[in-house]
Image (tube, rainbow, N blue to C red):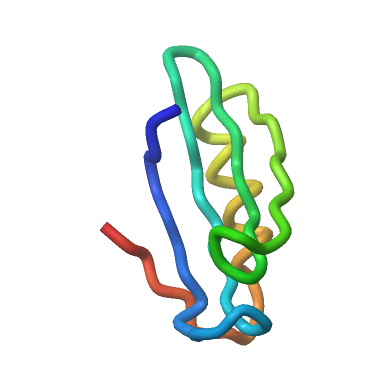
Amino acid sequence: MARARWWWNGKWGRLARRDVIIHHEPEVWSVEAREGGEEGRTRRFPASDEGEAGTIAEKLISTDERWREMT
């Protein structure tokens, strides 16, 4: 799956780092919520389209943390 958008909470370390990533293939969208970096805990949320994936991602990053969109 290709990565469409990616946010990071700006914190380093296995216990503090969080990432939210929107993935897509043609007609398949999902949002990955990752805690603790690549080797940490991952949850995936299926989405019907890009708009729904964006809504899910917005809910996941709507915290007091200083989220940064990565390129």
How many numbered marks does the figure carry? 0
Which quadrant holds residue 59?
A: bottom right
Horizontally, residue 1 falls left or right of residue 40, namely: left
Task: Relative to 10, say whether 62 is above or below.
Answer: above
Horizontally, residue 27 falls left or right of residue 2, namely: right
Q: Position of residue 23 (x, y in %)?
A: 48, 36
Relative depth, front residue between 60 and 39: 39
Q: Residue drawn at (55%, 84%), measured in percent from left and top?
A: 13
Relative depth, front residue between 14 and 65: 14
Q: Residue drawn at (67%, 63%), measured in percent from left and top?
A: 40
Q: Quadrant of the C terminus?
A: bottom left
Which quadrant holds residue 63?
A: bottom right
Q: Position of residue 68 (x, y in %)?
A: 40, 73
Q: Residue drawn at (53%, 35%), measured in percent from left and top?
A: 51
Horizontally, residue 23 falls left or right of residue 69, namely: right
In this view, which residue lies farthest toward the left? 71
Task: Relative to 58, say whether 16 is above or below.
Answer: below
Task: Relative to 2, say whether 44 is above or below.
Answer: below
